[in-house]
Image (cartoon, grey):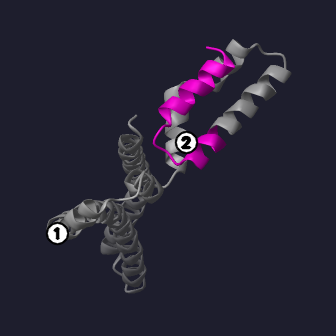
Amino acid sequence: MNKNEFLATLRERLNGLPEEDIIKSIDFYGEMLDDRMEDGMSEVEAVSDLGNIEEIISQILSAVSLPKLVKEKVKPKRALKAWEIVLLILGAPLWIPLLATVILTALAIYLSIWSVIISLYAVDLSVAICGLAFVGVAVALLFGGQFVPCGVVFGAGLVCMGLAILLFFAFNLVTKGILWVSKKVLIGIKGLFIGK
């Protein structure tokens, strides 16, 4: 694929984005191709060096906000006729609650994802605090002359603190996974708006 074919394909695949974003993306990737060709690559090598066009489109979509895409999609291409305005007004008792339901459902899902992440770190913090509390109790038992219970409680404190460290790294991986999946879902939703 040469430069012109690549940019034409990119323009076609980004159809549905605001025109300013399409032009900005085409100019950006056109300059990248020009820079690579100035460095001695052929057009075909420069295009293949950019990577898969699907990944490029995903990167562009992740940079465009969802409200901007929705606004572009619902923006009328022509002036509304009188009968269309009347239908919108008469249908408002139906479409406004449906729109509110969709928006509130999306918000609830978003908040649920973040509450899962916050809950994971709350569990980790509570295990760490338990470990510190056990160590504090062990010190009190040591000064009270109770050596065997002191050793048991101190060991439990060390186990809790070690578990808190392991949970921290595990929860970091889980959080990265959740955020990766939510990013892919958001890119998929944005792709629906541009017909990708």
Question: Circle 2 — which element?
Answer: helix
Read off the residue under disc 1: 90
Q: Which of 163 and 96 is in front in this view?
A: 96
The quadrant in which the C terminus is found is: top left
User: Which range is magenta?
Assistant: 1-25
**Could one spot residue 133 in this view of the protein?**
yes
Check disc 2 and give the amino acid type. Ile
Give yes or no for contact between labels 1 and 2 (Cβ–Cβ under 8 Å): no
Residue 187 lies in quadrant: top left
For label 1, the crowd category at 10 Å Cα-Cα, with few meaning under 14, some 14 to 19 and many 20 or more, is few
Check disc 1 and give the amino acid type. Leu
Left or right of 63? Residue 84 is left
Left or right of 78? Residue 26 is right
Residue 194 lies in quadrant: top left
Which residue does the image show at 30% across and 65% down from the upper left? 107
Left or right of 123? Residue 173 is right
Q: Where is residue 164 in the image (x, y as percent from the top left)?
A: 40, 61
Residue 60's tag is: 2
Q: Where is residue 121 in the image (x, y as percent from the top left)?
A: 38, 64
Left or right of 167? Residue 62 is right
